[in-house]
Amino acid sequence: MSLALTGRRAVAAVFTAALLVPLAACGSDGGAESAGGSTASGVDLTVLAAASLTDVFKTAGAAYEKAHPGTEITFSFAGSQELVSQVSQGSPADALVTADTKSMDKVKGETGTPVVIAKNRLVIATGEGNPHKVGALKDLADPGLKVVLAAPEVPAGKYSKQILDAQGLTVRPVSQEPSVRAVLSKVELGEADAGLVYRTDADSAPDKVDAVDIPDAQNAVAEYPAATLKESRHAEAAAAFVAWLSSPEGQKILRDAGFQAP
């Protein structure tokens, strides 16, 4: 073998090795897929939640993301009946939290096992200072009072009808709203004199509305079940978030916002 041929083979070997080094480095880059097939981009969860959870879930979501780097939560708030319709129509999401168990039961074939994470009670919301001196449920039957209620298919509307019927009261609302937050908004804006909302809704607007308590014997207890959705693309992460809502940290955030223990 000639000396020239040996030299050319040596140069080729060195050149080939130089090409392989950066290729090997790309395979172990932290931004690429790991051995398990997951990426470093994290998980984005979509949670469908009852409108009355708007404020507290924004706080809970921020706390969860801080404690679980790489997980981001996007909430979609609406009346429970609307959320159930979205699930039935196949809207992509990872978890569902409603303001009553009946709504959750309507999509039981689409969810994991629900767990109640909190409870709530109704109050009478009035304009700031309670200008019409509303003091009890019976006052809502006054035909001169503009009362707004949640629509009958909305959990807050069902609870409202339940407690008014139990007292034998006939209330003729000026409007029936698609969510409890819409009821609150009507009272805040002065478009209604009073409305039935959850305690936590009234507490969210202390400078705009007053809350008139309803005795427990005349009230209804709202339960909030949470469940993962079977079509979730992030089943493990969704289950972790739902479980966290029942953890001491999650429960403290709910209690601080005025929700009752499950």
Image (cartoon, rainbow, N blue to C red):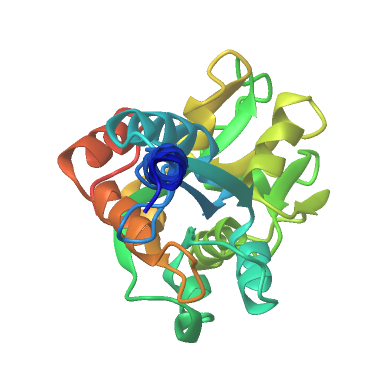
Quarter of the image where one finds residue 224: bottom left
**Quick one: 84 or 74, which is closer to the camera?**
74
Q: Is residue 106 shown left or right of residue 192?
A: left
Identity of the residue drawn at 59% across and 33% down: 125
Residue 31 visible in the displayed image: no
**Quick one: 182 or 66, which is closer to the camera?**
66
Identity of the residue drawn at 67% across and 19% down: 131
Question: Which residue reaches farthest left?
Answer: 248
Q: Position of residue 110 (x, y in %)?
A: 50, 80
Residue 182 versus residue 102 in the image, above or below: above
Q: Position of residue 171 (x, y in %)?
A: 70, 56
Quarter of the image where one finds residue 242: bottom left
Q: Position of residue 220 (x, y in %)?
A: 41, 58
Residue 19 visible in the displayed image: yes
**Rendered-image quadrant of the N terminus:** bottom left
**Rendered-image quadrant of the C terminus:** bottom left
Identity of the residue drawn at 79% across and 46% down: 143
Q: Position of residue 89 (x, y in %)?
A: 70, 77
